[in-house]
Image (cartoon, rainbow, N blue to C red):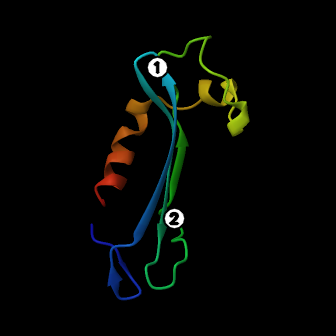
Amino acid sequence: MEMIIDGQQDPIVFFDVETTQRYQGRILFEFGSIFVCPRRLIELDGHSYSTLIRPDPFLDTFPDLSYKGITREDLASAPHFSQVADKIYQILHGN
């Protein structure tokens, strides 16, 4: 599906992810995207997306993220990556 805004195609999309280091890699625990009209530089209603992501496995030793405003309870009730992967893929591929 092609998105046309103010006579122009392709909005500008800004992404933000939050990660933390765990063992040998990094864990993604938040993903966000904001779609912006390229002519007027305003956020497009209904297109932006943000979600917390529950780490798997969810361990008692997961780092404290309260300094980022995220509690263990927030993450415990968040969807697993597999539940949001298709949506994130669609955003990253312009669908």
Q: Is residue 74 left or right of residue 27?
A: right
Quadrant of the image for the C terminus? bottom left
- Residue 55 higher or lower than 94, as above or below: above
Question: Mark 1 Cα within 10 Å, few/some/many (few <14, many 20+)?
Answer: few
Query: Is residue 48 or residue 17 the one in the foreground?
Result: 17
Residue 46: numbered disc = 2
Q: Position of residue 53 (x, y in %)?
A: 51, 33
Which x, y percent locates residue 43?
54, 71
Instruction: Tell me which residue sits at (30%, 60%) in the image.
Output: 94
> Where residue 14 sits: x, y (%)?
46, 61
Q: Nearer the viewer, mark 2 or mark 1?
A: 1
Q: Amino acid at mark 2?
A: Gly
Secondary element at image label 1:
loop
Give the residue at mark 1.
56
Secondary structure beneath dot 2 equals loop
Q: Residue furthest bottom?
A: 7
Query: Which of the 4 image quarters holds residue 26?
Result: top left
Kind of residue at badge 1: Asp
- Picture residue at 61% right of the left edge, 24% below the top: 76
Say which quadrant the N terminus sits in: bottom left
Q: Disc number at residue 86?
A: none
> Distance from label 2 to label 1 (Cα)?
29 Å
Report the number of discs.
2
Which tag, 2 or 1, sits closer to the chain's start?
2
Would you say 67 lies left or right of 8 here?
A: right
Residue depicted at 41% across the width and 87% down the height:
6
Q: Residue at x 51, y 64 (%)?
A: 46
Figure check: 38 above or below 1: below
Asked if the residue under mark 1 is in contact with the one under mark 2, i.e. CB atoms within 8 Å, the reply is: no
Q: Residues within 10 Å of mark 2 (few under 14, many from 20)?
A: few
* Residue 4 figure quarter: bottom left
